[in-house]
Image (cartoon, rainbow, N blue to C red):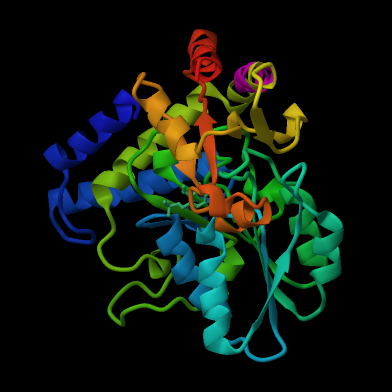
Amino acid sequence: MHASVIEAVSGYYLHSNANLGGPFETSQASDAVLSGARAELAAMLGCDAGEVVFGANMTTLTFHASRALTRDLGEGDEILVTRVDHDGNVAPWVLAARDRGVTVRQVDIDPEACLIDLDDFAAKLSNRTRVAAFNWASNGAGTISDAAAMCRMAREAGALSYVDAVQYAPHGPMDVHALGCDFLVCSAYKFYGPHVGVLYGRAELLERIKPYKVRPAHDEPPGSWETGTVNLEGIAGTAAAARYLVSIGAEAITGYERLLTERLIEGLDRIDGVHQYGTRDLDRRVPTVTFTVEGRSPAAVAAALGAQGIFVWDGNYYALELMERLGLEQNGGAVRVGAAHYTTAEEIDRFLEAVAAL
Ligand SMILES: Cc1ncc(COP(=O)(O)O)c(C=O)c1O
């Protein structure tokens, strides 16, 4: 977490710390924190402040949005999900569809590249599709989807696009209007902020689609989409995280992280018994690399690295569909190592030496 985020959170507690909409100083300060945060996130996402909704996390926002987006659907309607997505962008749609009698169609991936199969996406998209849910980058393979193409294809078919940008947000430039998505979600803790979810919704849709809400709460978006008392201290920190990310610049982050990704992939390639997953095309990767080591379980590899102060994950990281598609789920998934813009080449080398010495 960046220091400015911690200062913003403690600053909120020290100087504001009241509920919204009251006729007194601390409440007015809280109102200003919320509207300021919408503006900061709008600058980061390339949208208008009125298109920014805050929530508990990506998963909660997606359960909430999926219910609103499917409330008028029924038999004959379809929703597309993919085999590369985190379950946070699969299960909410599957469960909402089940409640409404809507059909869910699953878009396959190219298992070598771990990229969404665009031909399969096109084949499963039809004039019955109401929502297409897919990620911008995979947390399971570190691969970047052609989200712009899928948003365009969905729009042409008359479907809404719902993009999971949780994994992508800390690593690449975002402009939701240029991307052409209808909804996009991300999570501030993935871009050095607190545990807060952020939903972008196209203004006209936030207005037209009616979210589930309690009666006295705001009728106007974006407040109408925010349930209960929002996490204002977290939102203050989220604004600081967005400001930090914008101040570094996504292009600078992408350029530097590309070098780290290359070093990671090439280094792992040189180690006998290591198998990596996903495309080698650096234009289609964030610096997150998934691999297995012959003869060792992912849990054993992660534990051995953890004991040396190298923090990696093992398992499916909730990218359940992907791990099942790659045939890894029954063997404990895979090991995932991730770099960020503050990671050094020396740290990558230390990680590679530790894997080689296993
Ligand atoms: C790609 C992706 N989508 C969704 C999520 C879920 O986000 P949250 O924890 O904010 O619900 C994660 C979390 O790891 C993720 O990596």
From the image, give the main secondary structure of the stretch colored magenta: helix
Residue nearer the viewer, 28 or 96: 96
Instruction: Relative to 20, say whether 168 is above or below.
Output: above
**Residue 204: x %, y % from top left:** 60, 68
Q: Quadrant of residue 24?
A: bottom left
Q: Residue at x 49, y 56 (%)?
A: 199
Q: Is residue 260 magenta?
A: yes
In this picture, residue 30 sits left or right of residue 259: left
Q: Residue at x 80, y 62 (%)?
A: 121
Question: Farthest top residue?
Answer: 346
Instruction: Relative to 328, say whether 207 is above or below.
Output: below
Q: Residue at x 29, y 45 (%)?
A: 234
Residue nearer the viewer, 327 or 44: 327
Q: Residue at x 40, y 26 (%)?
A: 304
**Residue 116: x %, y % from top left:** 75, 52
**Residue 20: x %, y % from top left:** 23, 59
What segment is highlighted magenta in the picture? 255-266
Q: Is residue 211 magenta?
A: no
Residue nearer the viewer, 252 or 206: 252
In this picture, residue 175 sits left or right of residue 296: right
In this picture, residue 52 sits left or right of residue 260: left
**Residue 55: x %, y % from top left:** 38, 58
Instruction: Mark yes or no: residue 290 visible.
Output: no
Quadrant of the frame with the N terminus: top left
Instruction: Mark yes or no: residue 202 visible.
Output: yes
Labels in figure, total: 0
Question: Farthest front residue?
Answer: 295
Instruction: Relative to 289, say whether 197 is above or below.
Output: below
